[in-house]
Image (spheres, helix red, strand yellow):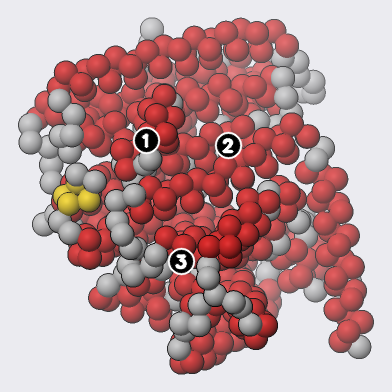
Amino acid sequence: MRVSKYVTLFQLTWQEYLAYRMNFALEVFGSIFLILVTTLVWKTLFSTQGSLIAGYSEHEMITYVVGAGMISSLLLLTAQGDDINDDIQQGRLSVLLLKPFHATVYWLIRDMCRKSLTFIIGIVGYSVVFLLYHDILFFPTSLWQFVLFLVFLFVASLLHYGFFYILSILSFWIDQTWGFRFVMRVVMEIAAGALIPLNLFAPLWQKIFSALPFQFFAYVPMQVYIGKVSYSQAFLLLGEGILWLGGIAMIGYILWRKGIRLYTAQGN
Amino acid sequence: MLAKTLLKYFHLFVLFGKISMMNQIASRLTFVVAVIGKIIRSALLVVFFQALFLHVSSFAGWSFPEVLLLIAVYLTVEWAVIVTFHRNLAYWFPKTLLDGSFDFILTKPLSPLFYSSFRIVDWFDIVSVPPIVLLWVYVLSRFPWSLQVQDIVLFVVFLLLAILFYFALLLMIASTAFWTIHATGVGRFLENIFRAARYPTSSFRGVFRIVFLFVIPLGFVATLPVEVLLARSSWYSMSYMIVFVAFLLFLAIRFWRFALKHYSSASS
């Protein structure tokens, strides 16, 4: 497998997205503003309600909110899956099928490129948050904890892509898939634990959220980061995440195989 | 004469609504799924605050029923702006500049500002209003006060002012599209800023409180209308909002006219 063609694809996508850098910047800075607002709210809550809320100290909660907010500012981008939907609906997939790589990999690279660019553009904003809370935010106590956190982030970004991929390639069968993607995004926003840790919810909601894979997007990585789970628990969770990833990949593969047989395109 | 003009624009708005309805229900499955998504989103906001109140006795001095009232007001304002002008100005208007179709808008015998602001009526949100109504019924049933007619009238006035505040802010930002063309990121940015209005302004302390009260007065969106309804607002905060919104609206319309003069067609 030649890697250079994927590097070239990444570079070309990067250049394409750079044209929209202002839009990316505004989107990520909006998310950072929201992180800042949420942390301010938590600071007020801690100043009025005591030093411990639901087992979280102020340092843990602010670190959680900033970390989860950063992750969601990279993952929960708008118009996710639009390009897949449009490529299929508008017949551009025909061109992609002639290229020396699989369309799924093409879309994955574009997705990763978008996430990377958003992260780089957001560095300035993230730095402001770090500067504001430099005395509150903390790093994991061990290097392994941090490495594990990064592994979870990688699993999260693949899972995230997988979900949008599955919902977007439904456009082989239906005209518009944005409704499904919108519902998932709405559920994801809260079930990922991007706003507050999931263990703050009522027991019934905790059960529902823990049965969904969205907890791997922000809640689980941040629990690992702030040291709320042991290594054995973390590895079990990683196994669960990889199982979800396998399941999503399998569903994606089946849908693609069935969908591509239905695909037709007209025009020149 | 004024009544005749208003009636003309009202008829146009109804007509826009009919056309939008026909377009949006063209894909019925997507329409139904999107409406479900909107309903879930409203419900999850309540779940989010319910989770917080499991661990804190009050939220920056606000009780749970008061916060529910705040959410009801926030969702009502959000609903009103999304149904009418938000997406028009934030997303569809910049597109007309990009593809040159704004030229045709200028040739129509109606205000380009009206057309750009209300061309597409969002039926996805109109249909998803039941959870907001249910929330209002629930909230009002939990409050022991007896509302006077003048309280309700005053509240409605401040609700309209909140909508006008958002309109003026968005109009100013959208007008920059005459120079930048790609202004959709601005819409996303403003959406994130707007989300901060879900929290009472008493959640913020120090310099941020001053910013959210006077510089970017997000308290106008939900906190102040709620305080008006609870007869807690001071006359100077109400006067400040009236003057601020009137001035911002005046400025926004002037800026739109100024920007319009700098429009150069994009079409061939």
- Counting residues from the start of the chain, the first of labels 2 and 1 encountered is 2
Same chain letter for marks 2 and 1:
yes
Chain ID, mark 3: B
Q: Which of pointers 2 and 1 indicates the residue nearer the eye? A: 1
- Mark seen at residue B134: none
Return the x and y of residue B79 as percentages of the image width and height. Answer: 64, 59
Task: Give the residue pinned by disc 2.
Answer: A183
Q: Residue at x 42, y 50 (%)?
A: B50
Disc 3 secondary structure class: helix
Number of marks drawn: 3
Disc 2 secondary structure class: helix
Chain ID, mark 2: A
Vertical placement of residue B133 versus A218, above or below: below
Most extreme residue toward the left is A142
Vertical placement of residue A107 versus A130, above or below: above
Q: Residue at x 25, y 24 (%)?
A: A151
Q: Residue at x 26, y 61 (%)?
A: A45
Q: Is residue B111 left or right of residue B195?
A: right
Residue type marked 1:
Pro
Labelled pair 2, 3 in contact (Cβ < 8 Å): no
Residue type marked 2:
Val
Vertical placement of residue B19 versus A260, above or below: below
Residue B13 visible here? yes
Neighbour tally class for label 2: few under 14, some 14-19, many 20 plus, Cα within 10 Å: some
Q: Is residue A171 left or right of residue A12?
A: right
Neighbour tally class for label 3: few under 14, some 14-19, many 20 plus, Cα within 10 Å: many
Return the x and y of residue B54 as percentages of the image width and height. Answer: 34, 49
Task: Give the residue pinned by disc 3.
Answer: B66
Task: Give the residue pinned by disc 1.
Answer: A203
Q: Nearer the viewer, residue B101 or B5?
A: B5
Residue A28 visible here? no
User: Distance from label 3 to label 1 (Cα)?
Assistant: 24 Å
